[in-house]
Image (cartoon, rainbow, N blue to C red):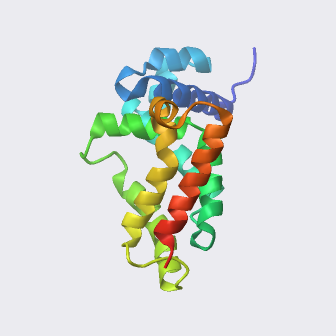
Amino acid sequence: MAARDPEATKARIFEAAVAEFARHGIAGARIDRIAAEAKANKQLIYAYYGSKGELFASVLEKKMLDLAISVPVDPDDVEGWIDRLLDYHAAHPELLRLLFWEGMEYGTAELPHEAERQAHYARKVAAVRDGQERGVITDAIPAPDLLFLLVAMANWAVVVPQMKRILVGGEDGDADRLRESIKQAARRIVDR
């Protein structure tokens, strides 16, 4: 009989949950499918996370932390930051799918673990504000609004790929052109 490895089991549950929630959203996700994919039993998932909603919140929190570590906001190199953000989301489209599903489920209602999310974004806004105070980017737009605009430009094509294909085109050169357009727009928005 194989020895139990709770950390390996949690890791399998996490990866299966990421895929399930990204594919089906919160309401459509099924713990049965997560358990089958993770080769774990449902009761163990509930023991670790409590509920499907808590599992989703945990998955999203961990994915957002990975993004924050991998691609910190950089007001000194906005174009480079946009490049890194685009690359990250191309490699990890599930994060934006999770955020989209969260928006569909909760709308403007308070989120589970919202205080932690606010702290997460407050750190990003602080980086933008620091760049404004140092004069490297414009202060004509409030820091939270500026961050929201930049992130929206960088993320939207992954959230609505069908719109990207219809409006921008679906060829490799089209994606490269859009990337340059996003960086140019970001540069214009942040210029002093």
Number of marks in the image? Answer: 0
Q: Is residue 121 visible?
A: yes
The image shows residue 75, relative to residue 48, as above or below, that is below
View extreme (right): residue: 2
Residue 109 figure quarter? top left
Does residue 160 appear to the left or right of 175 in the view shown?
left
Question: Residue at 52% of width from left, 62% of height from top?
Answer: 186
Q: Is residue 66 in sight in this rendering?
A: no
Instruction: Give the residue drawn at x 53%, y 85%.
Output: 134
Q: Residue 121, image x and y in percent?
A: 44, 61
Residue 79's x, y, as percent?
Answer: 61, 62
* Residue name at image x 67 percent, y 39 percent: 173
Residue 67 versus residue 78 in the image, above or below: above
- Residue situated in front as seen by the camera: 145 or 140: 140
Q: Position of residue 2 (x, y in %)?
A: 75, 18
Q: Considering the image in quadrants, where does the N terminus appear? A: top right
Which residue lies most toward the left here?
Answer: 109
**Picture coordinates of residue 89, whole percent (x, y):** 59, 43
For image coordinates 52% across by 31% down, the residue present is: 165
Is 136 displayed left or right of 102 in the figure? right
